[in-house]
Image (cartoon, rainbow, N blue to C red):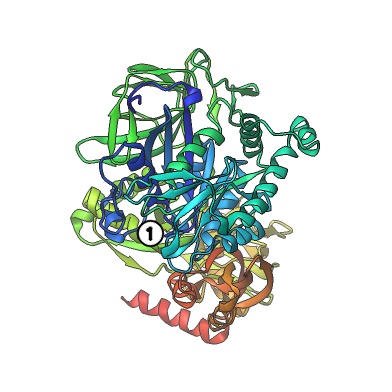
Amino acid sequence: MASAASAYETSNIRNVVLFGHGGAGKTTLVDSMCYVAGNTNRKGDVQKGNALTDFTPEETGHGISINLAVAHAVWDETRINLIDTPGYLDFLGEVLAGIRVGDAGLCVVDAISGVEVGTEKTWAAAEAASLPRAVFVSMMDRDNANFRNTVDRIRAELTPNAMPVQLPIGAGADFAGIVDLLTMKAHMFKGGDKGAADEVDPPAEVAAEVEELREMLIEAIVSADDDLLEAYFEGEELDPGRVVEVLAEAIRDGDVVPVFCGSCQTSAGVPALLDRIVELLPSPDRAVPQTASNGSGEVVLEPGVGAPAAVLVFKTTSEPHVGDLSYFRVFSGRITNGIMLLNPGRASTERLAHLAIPHGVRRVDVEVLNPGDIGVVTKLKDTHTGDTLCDGASPVTLEGIRWPAPDLSLAVTARTRADEDKIGSGLSKLHEEDPTFAAGYDPERGQTIIRGLGEIHLNISLEKMTRKYGVNVDIHEPRIAYRETITRTAEGQGRHRKQSGGRGQFGDCHVRLSPLPRGGGYAFVDSIKGGVIPTKFVPAVGKGIEEARRKGVLAGYPLVDFQAECYYGSHHSVDSSDIAFQIAGSIAFQKVAREANPVILEPIMEVEVETPEEYMGEVMGDLNQRRGRVLGMESKGRRQVVKARVPQAELYKYSAALRSLTHGKATHARSLAAYEQVPPHVQERVIAESRRDDNE
């Protein structure tokens, strides 16, 4: 067997991204495949904190995958790059990064719970990327495991193209082997921790089911090839090699999604899975061709060693005493140690020294990486996640990664003066490692706001900032970005006069404020006639109103959706000035806005909750308690999607509440829908809180 550090031809590389719901067994399966293949000398355990691809303190501490990680298993002279991704949707960005650089996906579904919300979401992401997929039904050795029921749910909720290629023999404590429906041989497990099995004829008790599934599989395969179809209908014996070739083509095209099974924990079925990954999943030179922009149009990249180099950086991490690590996928050309490449997006060049391939936390040094390889390099000067590096003589830009927009916010404050000095750089470094994490100071709310994909995402990001960058922060509920508006038309005078010796200040304007439709913003209208206010001073009135409206008149929030009309006034030939009319405009606004029945507006979020049907009552009751208005419901497989509009003020820590209500089986997304007038009792509370804050 070739060593992992050897250069592998593109045809002998497989890039497989593992995805699925949290707890389905992805990380354990990666450990098992690497152990069975001989690329690790022990099989790690997520619960013991020594899993191959869960190695950060945050992952070992929480017992879940948080980061995308890459390991490799060498099997049948083929290097299988295994891209392990988190199952919690708070870390969906890591899944999307893995999908972007994979040539095939392996969806792990546990045989007890079946298809769950995380399975559906990550499957949809893989489907949107047109990624060829296979399914591994895990935990066949656990109580209540049910392969046929799981397959039925996969077909109903994920894809009708799911087709078993293996059939388990028994389940739970009686899980004794698998039948390969292509070879019609049974693999009876011999025990041990490497999935060793004897190849025998299928047992009589599964013969009928084997025949049924074998016929379904063969019909699906031959329908993709005219010659095989003709031979099948004429009763001829099918060429096994050609059957495998056509099945591989059907998988690549998405016409068939093969379903395998086994146990990640005991490695039962893992050797057979490795065989089929090599045989059936596409190598980089047989995957869907990659395109890139060369500045004047799209070009198809040739996955050959003689083609100009083009790589995509899909992940950046930082390690103490090492610095930044840049993970990249080679899409075209050969990468050699020390090569100089252009970063076209930043007009800079980078030297790729100390090339390595990732294997969990370890890096294996290599001299050459061929098209299709996944590598890692340290100390790039100005290259970030999503950047392309390419041959300077043939510059191209690969499509980056479409990150999900962070939709959950928390406010943070530095715990000490020392933390205050470092908080900016710490938050910036977190964003560099994780583009779905964002942070910035919001002057309107007077708070530093961090944004992410969920509460777990944000809390773990802050844990990482403390560990890696020594920055401690306290978490607060973000202030709500309320608005104020007026509900009726009013008019009045603003007059500013100041005389204290020498030239004075004089500005006098009459202003009419009128409501605009919601979302109308602010408009200023000049209706002055007869030069009662010189033309050059009228814009100053508008500027004064503009500045004054930013602090409102009720609780200090910007006043919006109104028109200000300056229709009359007076001036002084010597004492009038821009600043005098600005002050007059501000005085007029303060006076008239209070007479125009001002009210407070609050942000209303469009909330979409996806939940199992049995929790519908709890979900809807909770939304109603949060002043929510349910807009409608729709079925999505065995789940229900509830759409509602809920005030943002009522959604603090909603993710945690939803997890508690539904035992972690529901998810939600939110986006700003509109601003609406708050109820009177809420307005009183907001005004009182504003006054209390001012007094403090």
Is 255 above or below relative to 189?
Answer: above
Q: Position of residue 558 (x, y in %)?
A: 53, 66
In-front residue for pair 640/564: 640
Is 219 above or below relative to 541?
Answer: above
Pointer 1 residue: 458
Residue name at image x 48 percent, y 27 percent: 372
In-front residue for pair 192/543: 192
Badge 1: residue crowd in 10 Å (few <14, some 14–19, many ≥20): many
Residue 220 falls left or right of residue 560: right
Question: Can residue 520 be seen here?
Answer: yes
Res 483 quadrant in image: bottom right
- The N terminus lies in which quarter of the figure? top left
Residue furthest toward the bottom?
681
Is 490 above or below relative to 424?
Answer: below
Question: Can residue 501 be seen here?
Answer: no
Residue name at image x 75 percent, y 34 percent: 236
Q: Position of residue 136 (x, y in %)?
A: 51, 50
Res 513 quadrant in image: bottom right
Say which element carries label 1: helix
Residue 199 falls left or right of residue 167: left
Looking at the rendered structure, the number of numbered marks drawn on it comes to: 1
In-front residue for pair 507/215: 215
Residue name at image x 32 percent, y 26 percent: 3
Q: Position of residue 458 (x, y in %)?
A: 38, 59
Task: Name the residue type under label 1.
Answer: Leu
Residue 546 falls left or right of residue 518: left
Residue name at image x 23 percent, y 62 percent: 415
Is 99 above or below relative to 209?
Answer: above
- The C terminus lies in which quarter of the figure? bottom left
Q: Position of residue 618 (x, y in %)?
A: 54, 81
In-front residue for pair 405/244: 244
